[in-house]
Amino acid sequence: MRVLVTGGAGFIGSHTVDALLAQGHQVRGLDSLEPPVHTGEWPAYIPHDAERVCGSILDQELLLRVLADVDAVFHIAAYQDYLTDFSHFFRTNTAGTALLYEVIVNECLPIQKIVVASSQAVYGEGKYRCPWHGFTYPGQRPMNQLERSQWNLHCDSCGTVLDPQWADEDRVSPHNSYAVSKRSQEEVALALGRRYAIPTVALRYSIVQGPRQSFQNAYSGTMRSFAVRVLVGKSPIIYEDGEQQRDYVSIHDVVRANLLVLADPRVDYHVFNVGGARRVRVRELADMILQETATSLEPWVSGLYRVGDTRHIFSDVARLGVLGWAPQVSQREMVQEYLAWAANQPGLRDTVGPAHEQMLALGVLRTATPTANTGSLLSRREASSINGVFRQPHWPVVHQPRTPQPDTPDVS
């Protein structure tokens, strides 16, 4: 097949390009190469066997040219960050997807499959259970609750702390601009796909981890953030209390899912979760990185919180499992692979501190009132100088016993 990969120079896109070439497909990568993820140049890891086209998903004439002779599309190009340029999310993610279908329909292009890269973010807080009142789908946590360092979600009826559940594909509740844009992207793709008989599938990736994950993008996850800090000799910064439960999946398992849905007509016009089938606390991930690097550093449990973050979220992958897919890469293997890759990158430096300063300045990252569980927290002034803060001896370090969990899927 001839396959177009939008976002082909990016993290997920480039690995998908590699896998398609390995299967014998002809591949064209489209990418705008824009900062902060890129520098305007094609990364060295993009193979020469792939055709490279630099440009925007919003360029209609360019889209017509790159779509004219292809059989399938992996639509992975997206804008993702924690910044407050809300309109940018919808122009790129939603309008860009609509334009893709517009060109295909208006030009009567015989596209056999479109795979749309969506996100676990569409679930918001996801699914919870109260022992007395059953299942519930709570909204985002109130700001005044977070300001008091009260991180957990409570039952609206009785106030009991809710127990997080595996999120299946049936119900979504996006509550930040990126999540809303990805949900609307799904709706556009699936609705237009059905209407015009363009086989379409949306994959909701959990937090994807692996080599090539940009150091520059504040959105790109705790693995990058923790690893970069530790590799340059600084303590990893943990938001809230570090007890957030997350669902991490290897880029290699994501690519396997991509290739599966490209070839399987049973997936058409449906949505599937692609996750790691394990629950990992943020603090556990930080500890694992520290253990693998054999450092004496300790995590900084800052009490900072990021507006729009969820407390817990992990995806149920049973629907994709029916088609024969299951994650194969363990959490520790993900950590080891990423550290080995990151440590060998030229010019490795702390890009986390400046990103935090920017988010603080925009009010995306905020400080909470200290509690017994978080210790002394950062004042706004202190937090804005977070880049070098861990070398100052008057800053307390929160020492908590490390209790690494076995690296096995938690299905309770």
Image (tube, rainbow, N blue to C red):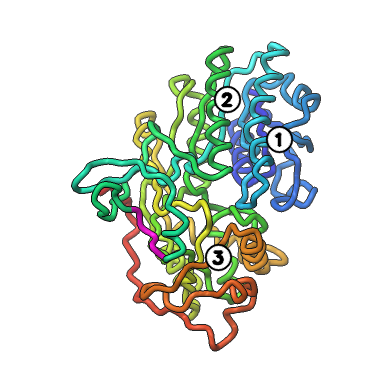
SS at mark 2 in the image: helix
User: Which circle, 1 or 3, is nearer the viewer?
Assistant: 3
Q: Is residue 44 left or right of residue 178?
A: right
Q: Earlier in the sequence, mark 2 or mark 3?
A: 2
Q: Are marks 1 and 3 in contact (CB under 8 Å)?
A: no
Q: Residue 150: x and y, percent? A: 38, 62
Q: Classify residue 244 by image quadrant.
A: bottom left
Q: Residue 29: x and y, percent? A: 71, 35
Q: Residue 158: x and y, percent? A: 23, 51
> Which quarter shows the N terminus?
top right
Q: Classify residue 382 by image quadrant.
A: bottom right
User: Which circle, 1 or 2, is nearer the viewer?
Assistant: 2
Q: Which residue is mark 2?
A: 188
Give the vertical position of 17 relative to 225 (above or below). above
Amino acid type at circle 2 is Val
Give the vertical position of 351 relative to 325 (above or below). below
SS at mark 1 in the image: strand
CA gap, disc 1 to disc 2?
22 Å
Residue at point 58%, 43% (across, down): 177
Residue 298 covered by magenta stretch: no
Amino acid type at circle 3 is Ala
Q: Is residue 73 left or right of residue 221?
A: right
The residue range painted magenta reads 149-153
Q: Which residue is mark 3?
A: 227
